[in-house]
């Protein structure tokens, strides 16, 4: 039986009250738009604590968590070894505004995992990393134009809020007021997986594009994989035109594989952007790449970029321990096995009830669309059945499964998710698909 939203809100009275209070204090009652449940309706769930694969809300309801804080909680919430690393670091002070030895430990781990990164700079968010990488690429090439793909989200810096994914797509905001046209005009956009259009754009902007930035698997429009040959074509065009290729691996880095997507596809980007997992749930981002490019960054070069809490000792300690746990034998095999169990369970359950569903996964990241045909770009994603997604999301939430509250987001699991957790999730999906299927039949019968 599909409950109405009212009964759902009543089932979580504490979240409802907290949301009403927050709405008067912070825009939309949240500190990041995608948390507001705008596209799925109902009251956002206020979480009180997490442990392992689970979250508990303020009303005491338990959920199996498939957001993992949008990627960072990949070893599970409140992992004892991570908490110890944080507590030990914090006991020595929170922040000094000086270099610390720990920052080089994290830098080594990242560079060892991604050889395309010869040198890097730590910052405090993915947004900061993306905007800084583009500034350096513009300085290195002496060019102004940048190229991004529709549906990709690279944080909220002005020049990147053009046909962006994630929360911008969820809210139907292709750009954003406040971004001057004088800025947006330098951002070119292309359809993902469209090599012919790429060739046209490059020839129309001959040697004028400073950088191309791309999410190697688009996680901010659902889960959209590159077609075979797409990145080879893109890399060749960039090399031919002296354009910097930037892989934004904020989401895929250490998530789809230890070496990120670049280790799977064999493409060596000129620059890479990271975030999320490298902080393990605390604020860490990074940008890096070829030494000749990164050497331009102040104080070794003239390109200015700075940050009070960049390389923060406690956040870096959290990231180091997280990467250490991830580098243990079998970690990525486990993540992949759980993702495979989940998406194939969803697919089989949806088929049993005649519901068109496409699924995909890579490592600990997965996605699904209510659609018959494969989704190849943002336009395809927007044509999927968003109403069915909304119903599915709410039914799963009521059944104790916390999925991303938007069809334009990927899902994430952790090393703490057990086979039994995944099986429970698939059983909940089966109940949801049954309910959706029965409703569709009733409507058809009217
Ligand atoms: P942050 O500034 O949110 O740390 O990172 C921006 C960013 C950059 N690049 C990619 C590929 C990203 O996925 C992100 C942030 N992702 C979103 C979720 N899709 C963060 C969640 C949110 O906005 O609240």
Image (spheres, helix red, strand yellow):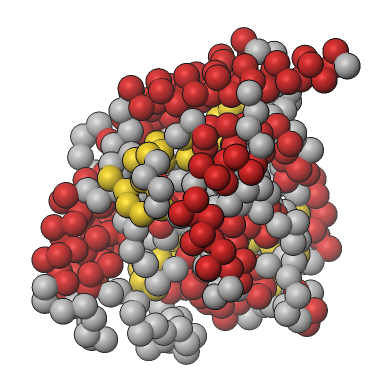
Q: Whole-percent x and y of residue 134? A: 57, 72
Residue 356 seen in render: yes
Q: Quadrant of residue 257?
A: top left
Q: Foreground residue, 273 or 172?
A: 172
Identify the residue at image location x=76%, y=20%.
440
Left/right placement of residue 266 relative to residue 446 reads left
Q: Whole-percent x and y of residue 301? A: 43, 86
Left/right placement of residue 36 relative to residue 118 reads right
Residue 195, placed above or below residue 375: below
Left/right placement of residue 401 relative to residue 214 reads left
User: On the rendered image, what quadrant is the C terminus found in?
Assistant: top right
Q: Foreground residue, 145 or 340?
A: 340
User: On the rendered image, what quadrant is the N terminus found in?
Assistant: top right
Q: Whole-percent x and y of residue 6? A: 64, 43
Q: Quadrant of residue 443?
A: top right
Left/right placement of residue 290 relative to residue 145 reads left
Residue 237 seen in render: no
Q: Whole-percent x and y of residue 227? A: 65, 35
Identify the residue at image location x=56%, y=64%.
20
Identify the residue at image location x=32%, y=56%.
280
Residue 260, placed above or below residue 138: above
């Amino acid at each position: 039986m599909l409950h109405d939203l009212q009964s759902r809100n009543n089932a979580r009275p504490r979240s409802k009250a907290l949301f009403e209070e927050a709405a008067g204090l912070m825009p939309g009652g949240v500190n990041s738009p995608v948390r507001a449940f705008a596209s799925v309706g109902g009251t956002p769930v206020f979480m009180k604590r997490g442990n392992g694969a689970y979250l508990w809300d303020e009303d005491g309801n338990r959920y199996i968590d498939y957001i993992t804080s949008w990627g960072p909680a990949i070893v599970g919430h409140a992992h004892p070894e991570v908490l110890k690393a944080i507590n030990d670091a914090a006991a020595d002070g929170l922040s000094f505004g000086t270099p610390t030895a720990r920052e080089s430990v994290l830098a080594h781990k990242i560079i060892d995992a991604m050889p395309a990164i010869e040198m890097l700079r730590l910052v405090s968010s993915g947004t900061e990393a993306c905007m800084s990488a583009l500034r350096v690429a513009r300085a290195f090439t002496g060019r102004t134009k940048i190229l991004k793909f529709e549906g990709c989200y690279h944080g909220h810096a002005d020049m990147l809020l053009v046909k962006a994914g994630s929360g911008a797509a969820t809210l139907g905001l292709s750009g954003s007021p406040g971004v001057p046209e004088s800025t947006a005009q330098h951002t070119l956009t292309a359809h993902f997986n469209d090599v012919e259009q790429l060739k046209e754009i490059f020839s129309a902007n001959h040697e004028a594009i400073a950088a191309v930035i791309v999410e190697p698997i688009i996680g901010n429009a659902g889960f959209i994989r590159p077609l075979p040959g797409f990145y080879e074509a893109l890399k060749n065009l960039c090399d031919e035109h002296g354009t910097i290729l930037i892989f934004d691996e904020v989401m895929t880095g250490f998530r789809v594989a230890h070496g990120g997507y670049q280790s799977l596809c064999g493409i060596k980007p000129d620059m890479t952007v990271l975030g999320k997992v490298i902080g393990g749930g605390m604020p860490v981002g990074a940008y890096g790449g070829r030494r000749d490019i990164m050497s331009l960054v102040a104080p070794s070069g003239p390109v200015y970029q700075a940050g009070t809490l960049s390389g923060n000792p406690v956040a870096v300690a959290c990231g180091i321990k997280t990467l250490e746990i991830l580098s243990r034998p079998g970690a990525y095999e486990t993540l992949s096995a759980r993702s495979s169990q989940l998406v194939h369970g969803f697919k089989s359950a949806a088929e049993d009830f005649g519901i068109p569903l496409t699924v995909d996964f890579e490592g600990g990241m997965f996605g699904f669309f209510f659609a018959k045909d494969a989704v190849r770009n943002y336009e395809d994603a927007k044509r999927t059945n968003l109403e069915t997604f909304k119903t599915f999301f709410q039914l799963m939430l009521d059944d104790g499964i916390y999925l991303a509250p938007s069809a334009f987001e990927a899902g994430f699991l952790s090393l703490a998710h057990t086979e039994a957790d995944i099986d429970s999730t698939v059983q909940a999906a089966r109940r949801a698909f049954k309910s959706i299927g029965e409703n569709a039949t009733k409507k058809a019968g009217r």
